[in-house]
Image: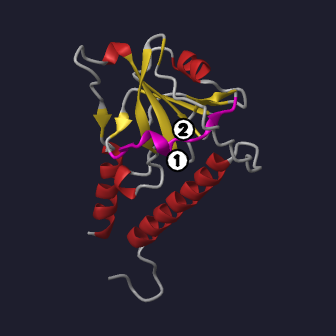
């Protein structure tokens, strides 16, 4: 035990590290909300005549999936992580799939966000197609996800001849992070 008036440098370092991580987490969350710092307008809900594009070039539609950013069990990692992202007020299904190139998965969220990834987060679940109701901002006749829901396409090179072969991956580094916290409190 430290003498009176002396700080325990081990505990102090751990507390300092945890506070820094918390601050970085908060800063990262704020920046992710809007790159310009201003809120984006809500996307347009698709007209009843809007449809899900079933297939374009090398991609096939596999369903509407939930986003996992607010899911602690998923490590607060996106449903489609580990790839590229773009956002555009003129986004269409075709422009997203072209942007994703040969990525195993492409997903469109909130009418304007295009996500490309090598896998789908294992905690993302397939929902009813009726749960994805936002129109693509570049083509109101197409469905492009919803708030925290993605219209997901799979590259044909990653499917089997019998149908879709989903590549789900867990969140390994979230487990490592929890392990580090466990070490801190031991």
Q: Which mark is residue 148?
A: 1
Q: Which residues are magenta?
A: 123-137
Q: Is residue 57 visible?
A: yes
Say whether residue 50 is magenta.
Answer: no
What is the secondary structure assignment of the residue under circle 2? loop
Query: Tag 1: Cα neighbours inside 10 Å, few (<14), some, or many (≥20)?
Result: some
Q: How many marks?
A: 2
Q: Which mark is residue 60?
A: none
- From this viewpoint, which residue is outermost toward the top? 57
Q: Tell which tag, 2 or 1, sits nearer the viewer.
A: 2
Q: Who's the residue at 68% across and 42% down the image? A: 43
The one nearer the camera, 169 or 131, is 131
Image side of residue 34 versus residue 78, left or right: right
> The N terminus appears in which quarter of the rendering?
bottom left
What is the secondary structure assignment of the residue under circle 1? loop
Q: Who's the residue at 45% across and 65% down the image? A: 13
Q: Position of residue 80 (x, y in %)?
A: 44, 35
The answer to whether mark 2 and mark 1 are in CB contact below 8 A is no
Query: Tag 2: Cα neighbours inside 10 Å, few (<14), some, or many (≥20)?
Result: many
Instruction: Quickly name the residue at label 2.
Output: 145
Q: Is residue 107 above or below residue 40?
A: above
């Amino acid at each position: 035990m430290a003498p009176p008036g002396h700080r325990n440098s081990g505990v102090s370092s751990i507390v300092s590290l945890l506070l820094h991580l918390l601050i970085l987490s908060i800063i990262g969350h704020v920046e992710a909300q809007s790159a310009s710092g201003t809120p984006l307008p809500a996307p347009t809900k698709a007209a009843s005549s809007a449809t899900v594009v079933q297939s374009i070039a090398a991609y096939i539609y596999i369903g509407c999936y939930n986003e996992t950013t607010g899911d602690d069990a998923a490590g607060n990692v996106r449903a489609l992580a580990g790839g590229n992202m773009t956002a555009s007020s003129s986004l269409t299904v075709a422009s997203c799939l072209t942007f994703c190139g040969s990525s195993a998965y492409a997903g469109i969220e909130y009418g304007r966000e295009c996500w490309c990834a090598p896998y789908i987060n294992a905690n993302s679940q397939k929902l009813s197609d009726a749960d994805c109701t936002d129109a693509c901002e570049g083509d109101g006749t197409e469905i492009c996800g919803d708030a925290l829901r993605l219209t997901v396409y799979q590259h044909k090179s990653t499917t089997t001849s019998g149908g879709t072969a989903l590549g789900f991956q867990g969140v390994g580094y979230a487990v490592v992070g929890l392990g580090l916290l466990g070490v801190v409190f031991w």
